[in-house]
Amino acid sequence: MANIKSQKKRILTAEKARIRNKAVRSELKTAVKEVRLAVEAADLEKAQAAVKRAGRLLDKAASKGIIHKNQAAQRKSGAQKLVNSLQA
C-alpha cells in the first residue's frame, strides 16, 4: 500500500473504475451473444433489435474509453454481418 495520500485515493478510484469497466465489458459480451443466438434461431426481427442495442452499447463503451473505438467498430461490423446473413 502506498504512503502518499493522493496515491491512496488513486488506488481507490482505480478499483472503482475497474469494477465498473468489468461490468460494462460483460454487458457488451452479453449483447453480442444475444445477436448470435437470435441469428442461430433465424429470428430476423429479434436479431435486428439485438444488433441495434449492441451497437449502441459498443459505441457508448468506446466513447467512455472502456474499449478502443476500432474494437467497437469491429464488433459492430461482425454482429451486423451475422444479421445480414439472415436476410440473404
Image (cartoon, grey):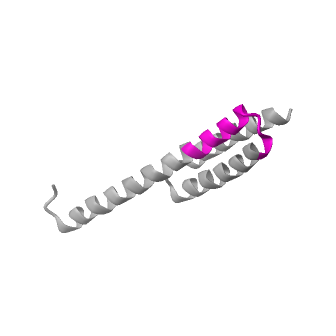
| Residue 42 is covered by the magenta coloring | yes
| Residue situated furthest bottom in the rendering | 5
> Is the residue 88 above or below the residue 26 in the image?
above
| Residue that appears at 35% across and 59% down | 16
- Residue 40 lies in quadrant: top right
Q: Please name whichever residue, 43 or 68, is drawn nearer the observer in this view of the structure.
A: 43
Residue 17, how many percent across, how many down?
38, 58
Q: Is residue 58 above or below residue 82?
A: below
The rendered magenta stretch, by its main secondary structure, is classed as helix
- Give the residue furthest to the right: 88
Q: Which residue is drawn at 80% across and 37% down?
A: 84
* Residue 39: % across, % down: 72, 35
Image quadrant where residue 19 sits: bottom left
Q: Is residue 55 left or right of residue 26?
A: right
**Between residues 5 and 23, which one lies in front from this camera angle?**
23
Q: In this view, does 11 lie to the left or right of 66?
A: left
Task: State left or right for residue 39 relative to residue 15.
Answer: right
Magenta segment includes 44? yes
**In the image, residue 86 lies at what x, y percent?**
80, 34
In the depicted structure, whether residue 73 falls above or below residue 37: below
Q: Give the range drawn in magenta.
A: 30-45
Q: Quadrant of the N terminus?
A: bottom left
Tally of marks: 0
Quadrant in which the C terminus is drawn: top right
Residue 24 at what x, y percent from top left?
49, 52
